Each structure stands twice: as C-alpha cells, then as structure tokens.
Amino acid sequence: MPFARSGGCGAPVRIVLDTNVVLSALLWRGPPYHLFEAIQKSNSIEIYTSDILLEELKEVLLRPFSAKRLALIGRTVEHILTNYIETVDLVTPIATPRVIMNDTDDDHVIAAAVAARADFIVSGDRHLLSLGTHQGIGIITPAEALQAVTIR
C-alpha cells in the first residue's frame, strides 16, 4: 500500500501519528522508530499534530515507565518534546467529533487529522484501526506505513 495522495501528484503526503506511535518512535527502536526516521528523511511526507496530542504525549512521557526509559537512553522529557515539535506542523481542530465511543482520546487524533487534511493516521490503537478510514483518511499501522514509505 504505497502512500499516495488522492488529490494530485507531487503534493506531500500528510499524516498524523497517534501518541502511541510517537512514544514508541521516540523511546524504542521498532517499526515506529524506523518509520519516523524515514519520514524525517523524506521531502514528500509531512507530520501534523495538535496541542491536545502534544499535551497527551507530554503526560505519557512523564509517567514512571517512560521516565525509566528516558533515563536509560539519557534523554529528558523536554529534550524529546523539543525535538519532536521541531519535526511536526501544528494544527488547531475547530471541532472534536465523537467517533470512537470507547476511547475519547482517539477522537482528538481524528480531529487533528481532519484539521490537517491528512491522508493517513498511523496508529497502533485497535479502536482507530478498526475504522479503516474516516472522511477519506486512511488509518494504518506503523508497519504498513513503514512499508509504504520504503516503497516510495
């Protein structure tokens, strides 16, 4: 499944990474990390987020399990957040639709994607993945996104 924009050739692919993917990319070295690296090297993929998603990321980074990992890799929450913020574009959703009844945090991911006019949401969350798409925005796993990036 290559990243392809439905709206025209040459335009960058716009994606929103769910917080679980961002956390994995920043703290571990699995598929989300490799995806994030590939995106950073690409001139044809843009990452978008919102203030609410950044706040959620900060909150998760401050939890004990994250603090242990940060200590292990010699990084601080501030360092991780600053580097991430420099890589993404910020959007401000005008509304947060109720889409995922079992997890309202997922609605913020969808709201950011709609505001960003994203082509894809990359998530490991089963609630989001079970949708498959929302308003034409594909919802894919980090492994699917990594495969698409490496095909590009």
Image: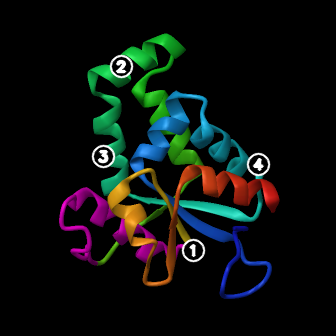
Looking at the image, residue 69 sits to the left or right of residue 120; the answer is left
Part of the protein shown in magenta: 95-119
Q: CA distance from mark 4 to mark 2?
A: 28 Å
Q: Which residue is mark 4?
A: 41
Amino acid marked by disc 1? Asp
Residue bearing mark 3 = 56
Q: CA distance from mark 1 to mark 3?
A: 22 Å
**Residue 52, image x and y in percent?**
30, 55
Relative depth, front residue between 132 and 26: 132
| Badge 3 amino acid | Glu
Label 2 and label 1: CA atoms lie apart by 33 Å
- Dot 3 or dot 4, earlier in sequence: 4
Q: CA distance from mark 3 to mark 4?
A: 26 Å
- Give the image quarter of residue 58: top left
Tell me if residue 104 comes above or below residue 22 in the rendering: below
Look at 57% across and 51% down and name the residue there: 142
Q: Quadrant of the C terminus?
A: bottom right
Q: Is residue 96 left or right of residue 118?
A: left
Q: Secondary structure at mark 3?
A: helix
| Mark number, residue 119 | 1
Asked if labels 4 and 1 touch by Cβ distance under 8 angstroms, the answer is no
